[in-house]
Image (spheres, rainbow, N blue to C red):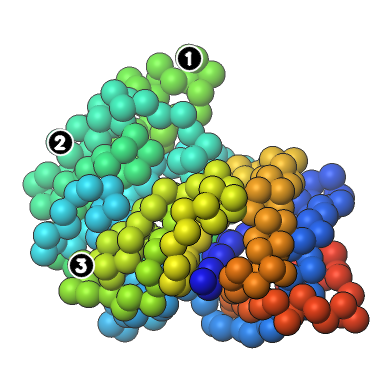
Amino acid sequence: MHCHLLIPTLFPPGANTPENDPLHNAHAPALESMLARGKHTNSSEMEMESWLCKHFGIPSQPGYPSSYPIAPLSLLAEGIAPEGAAWMRADPIFLTVERDQLILAEASSLPIDEQEAQALIDTLNRHFSEDGLEFVAASPKSWYLRLSRLPAIETHSLHATAGQNIHPFLPTGPDARQFRSLLNEAQMLLFEHPVNLAREQRGLPPVNSVWLWGAGTLPQAALKNFDHIWSADPLATGLGLLSGAVSHPLPAGADDFLSQGNDGKHLIVFDQLRTAWHNGDPFVWREQLAALEKNWFDPLKRAVTKGKLSLSLHLPRSTGTSSFTVRRQSLLRFWLPKRRLTHYRDKT
């Protein structure tokens, strides 16, 4: 059995103070051993989404090398048939004003119920329906936009933009003006929406915009490089469905995973650290790392030591993805010292 672990945001950027740095005093002995003794390689993918698409053989939009059909692939996992239409992700967000900048907060930090989501979606659809656009809420926090045609546009993922000024991440390309206008109109529609006024009265942040990204049509096929996919991420699950791999929910820990006794090649996606980082909470990030160390990294390392499996850890970062392949023989290289996780952080 060989397991591929995809772990975005394991090496987040530093902070102005140690207390706000997720890696400050972060310690994961099993993980550190595997990183120190595994065979290290690098690839160019800087985000989890591009890594997934490359390893399932999904090409980017012609002329736009960083734009992949994230939306229709994610829809498969949401139980919605993309058919032959073009789709974009239209994730609900909260924009805050800091000085002269608009800062994006992603939906995972927003409590949104089904009634609120549908009311906001209905307002957007009444306004944009004449343009051949249709917003769809697959879940309260997962929205999509059905398009009349595939746009010539370059976008940036929600995850690359979260917590930052949105201006450098706005759409570019021949059709960018239309979609920048759409974003402005959506913000005006949602600014004083009754749902948001009620949310503010309850002390909740408003859902005052959407983030458009991941445009494309559903590819005809995907490479079956993995036999099993274990993930809560809709893109990974959708790629598994398209490729013919068996998709599973993410187990509570490695013991549950190993007890199922499935042979073959496995892809396990951990996005807990990315969510904690986007929410701007270094303490929750360290708690999530400690849980991964206890529930996954330590028992998987023990399984590798016993020869039950081998591992590849794939760690997307701003300079590309670092991969570490760990086999039983790797862990016998005791002369290679463990290093703290800060050692692997991108140098600025």
The amino acid pointed to by label 3 is: Thr
Q: Which mark is residue 201?
A: 1
Percent x, y of residue 124: 23, 38
Q: Mark 1 near mark 2, Cβ–Cβ under 8 Å?
A: no
- Residue at 69% across / 68% down in the picture? 306
Q: Residues within 10 Å of mark 3 (few under 14, many from 20)?
A: many
Above or below for 95 versus 197: below
The residue carrying pointer 2 sits among few (fewer than 14), some (14 to 19) or many (20 or more) residues within 10 Å by Cα, namely few
Q: Nearer the viewer, residue 250 or 24?
A: 250
Disc sitting over residue 179 in the figure: none
Q: Residue at x 19, y 49 (%)?
A: 80
Mark 2 or mark 3, whichever is nearer to me = 3
Q: Which of the two labelled residues, at mark 3 and mark 1, occupies the earlier sequence position?
A: 1
Residue that appears at 59% across and 62% down: 7
Query: Residue 6 at what x, y percent from top left?
Result: 54, 65
Q: Tags 3 and 1 in contact by the CB under 8 Å rule?
A: no
Q: Amino acid at mark 1?
A: Gln
Q: Is 326 on the left or on the right of 237, as rendered?
A: right
**Which of the marked residues, 2 or 3, is nearer the chain's N terminus?**
2
Q: Residue 249 or 124: which is nearer the viewer? A: 249
Question: On the picture, is 186 further left or further right than 217?
Answer: right
- Residue 332 occupies quadrant: bottom right
Residue type pointed to by label 2? Arg
Q: CA distance from mark 3 to mark 1?
A: 40 Å
Residue at which label 3 appears: 217
Residue linked to disc 2 = 126
